[in-house]
Amino acid sequence: MAVSNHEGVESTKTQNNKTTESQAAKSALEKLAVNSYSFESAFSVLKKRQQYFRISTGAKSLDEILGGGIEPSAITEFYGEFRTGKTQICLQLAVHTVMSKELGGLDGKVIYIDTEATFRPERLLQMAKRYTLTDVLENIYVGRPQSVKEQMQLVQELNDIKPDENVKLLVLDSLTSHFRAEYIGTPQLLERQQLLNKHMSDLLKLALNKNIAVVVTNQVISNFLTNDKLAVQAVGGHIVAHASTHRLELSRPYSQPSQKPFLNAKLVDSPNLPEATAYYEITAFGIEDIKSKINPKLLQEIQKQKH
Ligand SMILES: Nc1ncnc2c1ncn2[C@@H]1O[C@H](COP(=O)(O)OP(=O)(O)OP(=O)(O)O)[C@@H](O)[C@H]1O
Ligand SMILES: [Mg+2]
């Protein structure tokens, strides 16, 4: 108990005791942050994050809403209806990962898990022409699991990756197709969700332990809202929503037949980035910013459609 004199000042002895106690407490914490398996100082986390690489999506507007591109040690999820560019974005990211540093790439390797049989090396070669590259296929390794079991096993095998193998990107296109095909209807929903939870947890551990950028695509289901509007919902419900670090909803807004179709990506969830929308198009060269300016009136209409 603190002993105070008549002016309310604690005795020197008590003060000294307190200082020693707080020093001991501080050094115990510091020790934890340096030596412990589970703690590190926030400053050290920031330092690491500042050194993270970024993978460009090919469109500046999309990179911007992602804080400079796809980041490692995290799961980034792209979900949306068919032909909204999910696979094209994955292929584009693969090209940027293997590209040389001089050209803005990472000189890295890519693991590409293709569950929908839509991986196309010839499309990669076409995208590479944008940078006058010809040799992008060497460092992209493709896996084609044919079931949930094989898919989960493949991801677990990736724990053997060594840092000098220089793997920077893991693509999973798509995360959910096998789960949807094998676990049908309400009776199997609980088991499906439990397995998805385990799978997402394995993916996150891999991203963190190997400092890899994990990118997954996800399918959607459509639901009619009470006002007869159609709303899309990503497959996997809360499990996938919670486990993904950054989530982007891709859509193809309605455009007049005379207008060139374009697409939009909305960052709907992120631990450090605000909600934002980017516009892009798919061309022979891959994912690109929209060159022709979008009519502001049309943009307004799109915003209305989405709410
Ligand atoms: N070489 C190309 N040049 C221009 N556009 C292309 C080219 N190849 C594909 N596309 C366009 O990309 C779109 C398909 O995009 P993508 O395959 O990424 O869709 P997705 O969102 O993955 O769909 P799904 O849910 O069916 O897998 C199509 O509209 C197609 O016209
Ligand atoms: Mg696809």
Image: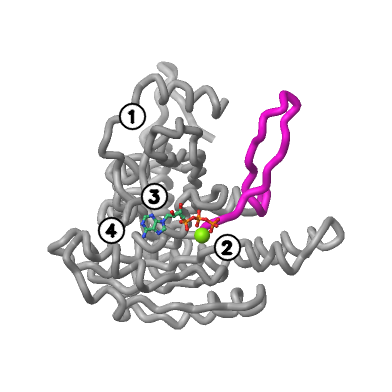
Amino acid type of the residue tagged 1 in the rendering: Ile
CA–CA distance in space, label 2 to label 1: 32 Å
CA–CA distance in space, label 4 to label 3: 33 Å
Residue at the disc numbered 2: 175
- Residue found 68% across the figure and 43% down from its top: 222
CA–CA distance in space, label 1 to label 3: 56 Å
Image location (x, y in percent) of residue 53: 28, 58
Residue farthest to the front, as pictured: 258
Image location (x, y in percent) of residue 98: 27, 70
54 lies left or right of 91:
left
Amino acid type of the residue tagged 4 in the rendering: Phe
Q: Which residues are magenta?
A: 217-238
Amino acid type of the residue tagged 2 in the rendering: Leu
Residue at the disc numbered 3: 26
Quick check: can you spot residue 27?
no
The residue lying toward the viewer, choosing from 161 and 79, is: 79
